[in-house]
Image (tube, rainbow, N blue to C red):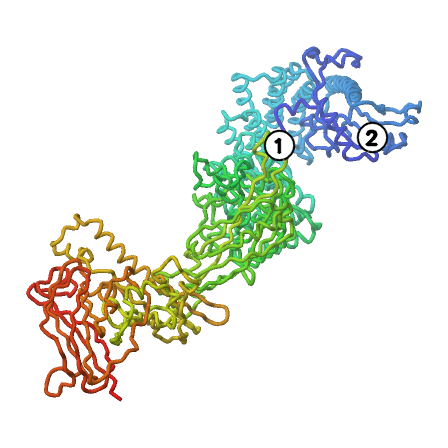
Amino acid sequence: MEPDVSIETSCMIRIAVLPIGDVPSTLLRDYHSMLLRHCTIPLSTISSFYTEHQKSPFAHQPWETGSLRFKFVLGGAPPSPWEDFQPHRKILGVIGICHCPSSPDLDLVIDQFNAAWRGYSSVLVQRCFAFSPGDSQLEDTKKRENLVLFPPSDRSAQELHLQTMMQDISASLLMEFEKWVLQAESAGTILKTPLDSQATLSSEEVIKAKKRRLARAQKTIGDYCLLAGSPVDANAHYSTALELARLTADYFWYAGALEGSVCALLVDRMGQKDIAIEDEVRYRYNSVIVHYRKSFIQENAQRVSPLTFELEATLKLARFLCRRELAKEVSELLTSAADGAKSLIDASDKLILFVEIARLFGTLGYQRKAAFFSRQVAQLYLQQENRFAAISAMQVLAMTTKAYRVQSRTSISKQSLSDETETGHVDSGKMHHQSVVSLFESQWSTLQMVVLREILLSAVRAGDPLAAWSAAARLLRSYYPLITPAGQNGLARALTNSAERLPSGTRCADPALPFIRLYSFPLHPSQMDIVKRNPAREDWWAGSAPSGPFIYTPFSKGESNDNSKQELVWIVGEPVQVFVELANPCGFDLSVDSIYLSVQSGNFDAFPLSVDLPPNSSQVITLSGIPTSIGPVVIRGCTVHCFGVITEHRFKDVDNLLLGAAQGLVLSDPFRCCGSPRLRSVSVPSISVIPPLPLLVSHVVGGDGAIILYEGEIRDVWINLANAGTVPIEQVHISLSGKNQDSVISIAYENLKSALPLKPGAEITIPVTLKGWRLFLGESDTAAGKNAFGSMGRTLKDGSSPSLLIHYAGPLGDAEDIETNKSSVPPGRRLIVPLQICVLQGLTFVKARLLSMEIPAHVGESPSSLANMDSKPFGEAVGYSKIDRLVKIDPFRGSWGLRFLELELSNPTDVVFDISVSVQLEKSGNEDNLSVDSAAEYGYPKTRIDRDHFARVLIPLEHFKLPFLDGSIFSKDLQSDGSTAGRNSNFSERNTKAELNASIKNLISRIKVQWQSGRNSSGELNCKDAIQVALQSSVMDVLLPDPLTFGFRLARNGSENAAKLDLPKEPDTSIQHIASKNSVIAHDMTPFEVLVRNNTKETIKINLSVTCRDVAGANSVEGAKATVIWAGVLSGITMEVPPLEETKHGFSLYFLVPGEYTLVAAAVIDDANDVLRARAKSESSDEPIFCRGPPFHVHVNGTA
C-alpha cells in the first residue's frame, strides 16, 4: 500500500528528487518546496519545448485546458512489483539537487547523478539542478549532459528558471509517453503482476494468458494516456480493456481499468463535482472493490494478495466522499477498511492503512476515532524496537493527545494562552461548563493513562528525556488517584531519571507536582496602610479612612463596586507577600528545590523558597518579592523547580481543576485529599506599583509581647519608631483608637514632632504612660486564674486593648504639579501600633462595710463658739495634727466621733501586694485664705497582702452631715406609700437630693487606695464602688443629722460668751478639738447648761431629761448611794425648740466624790411628724419618738 492515495493518484507522474553530493538539509527542503509549487504544468506552456516526431497517439490531447501532474518523491522510492499494473507507481523521472558550494567538482556531481538515476529502470527523463554555482563553474564551457546550472539570483528569478526547466521536463516526458504508446500498439508488450503464477504454465493457461494480454495492454495504454493529460483517449482505451477483461474473467485488471476510467472521468471534468458525478464515482468504485475482492486466489494468499488494492480503492472512495454530509457513509467505508487490516500480511501496509484511516476520520472531525487509529500506528512503530520508530511513535501519539485531552502545553498556541489569560482577568477565575468539560473528562481516565504511558515509553526509547519528563508529569499530575503508591514512586523515578539527562535549568511547559493554588493576598501590615492626602487641610488624613492595600473594600461608603475588580497597590522597594497553598497527594516525599512567583511583567523580583512536603499533605507558604519599578504587575502563578526541571504552575489551571472536581468532572480534589479545607476561589487582583513612600516601623522596647498590667497599675512603655523607607517623614500625627482609650494616660507626642523630618534610617523612642483598666465581672473571673498567660490569650483576642494611630507622610513634591494635578500628591500612610495590654486581676474586693466609734466629749469652758471655730482658717488651728481632723466633735451629735470604711481584700495572684491608704483632708470653710496644706493628704501605714491571703484595710472617714433634716430626703420612700406626689417636687427638694449625692461623691473622691508589688509595679485600686455600696446601707446614719442635737457646757458666772451649738454652713466641718482644759472641783456647786438644737424646719415639742452616771455606769443622782447633788430640774423638762435653733436649760451639780462622770441628755418628742418618724424608722403613728444624745465626760478633781 501507498500513503496519501486518491482517485487522482493514477494521473500523477512520479519524479524522484535526489540530493547529489553534500546538500545541507535546510537547503534541500527549501529546493524541494520550490519544486512542489510546480506539481501541475499546463500543456499550453510546454508547446515551445514539445516536438512532434510522428503523429501523436493522443488524438484528443487537450492542449488548451489539459495539464501534466507531478508527484515529487524526496529521496526516491524502491521499485514496486505492481508497476506494470499501475504505471503511475513507476519513477518516470529523476531530478538531482546539487549545492555547488558544497560540491565544487561538477564532473563528480554528474557521475554521482548518473549512478543515482540508473538505479531506476523506469526513468524516462533525468535532470540535475545545480544551485548557486561559483564563477569558475559558470565559466566552465564543458558541456555536461542533463546538468542545469541555476546562477545565484533572487528567489523570484530562481523560481522562474525552475518553472522553465519543469516545462522542459514535462515536454520530454510527453514525448516519451508517445513513444511508449506507439511501441505498445505496434509491437505489444507482456505485462505481469505478482498475482500471475510463476510456475510452468499449462497449455490452457498459456492460451488464457494470450487472451488477457490484449486487455492488459489496452489498460496500460489508457494509464499512459492519463499520465499524458489526455483523459478522453484514456477513457477510450479503458473501455476496450474493460470489455476484453470481462471476456477473459481477468477481474484484477478489470478493476484496475475501471479505477482508471473513474480517474479519467474526474480529470476530464477538471475537478467539478455534482450529484451525478458523485453517484457515478460511487457506483464504479463499489464495482472496483467487488472485482478486487473477486480476484483473490486462495493459493496465493500466503505470498501476495489483492487485498491491498481493495483497501486502497476503499480509501480512495472514502477520500472522495469525505465531507460532513456523508460522514456516516465514509465511516462505514473506513470501518470496513479497518476490518480488512486483520488480513494484511505486511506490517507496513497496516501502518499505512491506519495512517490513512486516521487522516480521513480527522478530516471528518471524528477526532477520537482518528486518535484511536493513530494509536494503532504508534503501536506498530513500537513493535519495531529501534530509535527512529520510537520517534515516529512518539510524534504520532503527540498528535492524539488533543483528542484524548492530555495534550502538552507546548501544543497549545500562544494565542489561546493569551486569550485564556485575558479571560481569567475579566471573569475573575470563572469558567463555563463546556470549557471545564473540554479540559477534564473523568470517564476517559483509563484510556488517557494508557496514552500517556505509551508516550512515556516511546519517549524513553527515542532518547527524548524532555518528552519523557513531560509525559510522566502529565500522568502523575492528572491521574494520581488511579495510580498505586508503587506506580507513583515509579513515575517519580522516571521524572528524576529524565531530568538527569537534561541540561541544568531546562524548562518544561507541563507542570508536575505539587498542586499550587492561590490562598490569599494578605493585607499589608498595619504600618503599610496607604491614606489619601489632602494638602489643603491641616488634618490631611481626615475624610480618607485607609482601606488596607485594596483600593476597594466592601466596608467603604459610596457607590457599590464589583468585587472582581479589586486593585492592589504595591510600593517600589517594599517587600510584598502572597500566600499560596501547596498539595502533595501522592505517597512519596516531595522536595521542591525552589518556588517563586511567576510574574509576567518585568518590574518584580521574586524570592525563591524551598519546601519539603510529606506524603498526602498540604502546606500554606508565603512567597515574597520586591517591586522594582512603577507600573502594573501580572502574577500568573508560580515557577517551580522540582524533579530537576523548571515548570510554571498557573493559578487558573488549578482553579479550573477545582471547579471540575466540584462538578464531578475531575477524579479528585488534590487539596481535599490532603485534608485541606474547602477554600473559595481567590482571584488575582489588578496590581499596580506606585513610587516609594516613607515607611515607619515600630516595636516596643523590651519586646513586642503582651504588656501585662494588674488592674489600676500605672507603667511607662517605650515605643521605638524608625523610618525604614527611602523617603523622609515630614508630617506626623498621633491619635488613639479601639477600646479602653482611657488607659493611655499620656503620649510624648512633642518628642516625635521635634524629631521631624525623620530621615531614612533615623529612629526615635517615645514614652507612653499606661494604666490598667478595670475588669468587668466576666473578665475578672477569667483573669483571676492562676495561669496569667492562659487568660492573656483571651484578653488579647477580645480586642480590648487600645491602639496608637500614627498618620505620617513624606514631602509634598512640586507645588506647581500639585496645583495642576491633585492626583500627583504622594499619599500618606497610617501606622497602627497595637498596645497589646493584658490586664490581670490584682486585688479583689471581697466586701466593704462602714464602722463607727463614738468617744465622749469633755464638758468644759470654751471662750469661742463652735461656729467661730469652724470659720477659722485651717492654718490658725495651731496645735492640731492632721489625724486630729479626723477625730472631731460631731456638731450634729455633740460627741467625739470616728468612722472607718473597712475593705476586705483578696490576693489571688502569685505576687505580694503592699497596700497604702491616703485621705485628702477637707479644706477649711474660709475658701479665700487657702494655705498650702489645705489639700494635704494623710497617709497610713502600709498593709501587706501575701499570695492567696486576705486582709482588711481600715480607711478613716471624715465626719460630715447634711445641714438639716428635710422631708424631701424621704420623698422617694414616701412616694412608694402614696403619701407624697413626686410630680409636685419643688426646686428645694431637688436641690437637697443633689446636695446629698454631691456629698457622697465628695467623700468618695478624697480616698485613695494604692498598691505596690515589687520594685516597678504600682497602681491604684478603684474603691469608689466599694465605698458606694458600703454607704448605701447606712446612708441615713452617715449623712442625715439627728432631729435633735444635745450638748453640755459649764455656765460659771453666767458668762454670755459661753459657746452655743450652731449649725455649720457645710455638712463636713473642719476638724477641731473642743475639749476644755478647765476642770470641775468636787464639793463645789458647778453650774451646767444643756443645749438642745432643732435640726428640722419645724418646731419640736420635747420632754427633756438629764442623767449623770458614774464611771461604773450607775445613776449618780438617784438612789440611796447617790454621789451627786443637783439644783434645778433634771427630768420632765418641757420645752419647744424653734426650727434650726437651739434652746438651753440650766442646772447645777454638786459632786461629792471626785472622779469621772458622764452627762447624758434625752428627750421624748411629742406629736412627731412624718419626717421625724421616717428618720426614727418608726412604723406606728402612736409610738413616741425618743432621742438620746451622746455621753459627755466630766472630770471631777478632788480638793487640796
- Towards the viewer: 811 or 46: 811
Q: Give the secondary structure at mark 1.
A: helix
Please state which amino acid type lies under the numbered disc 2.
Cys
Residue under the image location 19 percent in, 76 percent down: 1087
Q: Residue furthest front?
A: 1053
Label 1, label 2: how far apart the Cα atoms are: 71 Å
Q: Give the secondary structure at mark 2.
A: strand
Task: Give the residue pinned by disc 2.
Answer: 98
Label 1 or label 2, whichever lies nearer to me, is 1
Residue 375 visible in the current orientation: no
Q: Residues within 10 Å of mark 1 (few under 14, many from 20)?
A: few
Quarter-of-image position of residue 1179: bottom left
Query: Which x, y percent locates residue 717?
Result: 52, 60
Task: Give the residue pinned by disc 1.
Answer: 817
Query: Which x, y percent locates residue 102?
Result: 85, 34
- Towards the viewer: 1081 or 1024: 1081
Task: Name the side, left or right, on which 1029 lies relative to 412.
Answer: left
Asked if the residue under mark 2 is in contact with the one under mark 1, i.e. CB atoms within 8 Å, the reply is: no
Residue under the image location 51 percent in, 53 percent down: 833
* Mark found first going from the N terminus, 1 or 2: 2
Residue 697 visible in the current orientation: yes
Please state which amino acid type lies under the numbered disc 1.
Asp
Q: Residue furthest left?
A: 1182
Q: Relative to 1052, say whether 503 is above or below.
A: above
Q: Relative to 903, say whether 548 is above or below.
A: above
Badge number at residue 135: none
Query: Which x, y percent locates residue 1184?
Result: 9, 67
Residue under the image location 9 percent in, 65 percent down: 1166
Task: Name the side, left or right, on which 830 lies relative to 165.
Answer: left
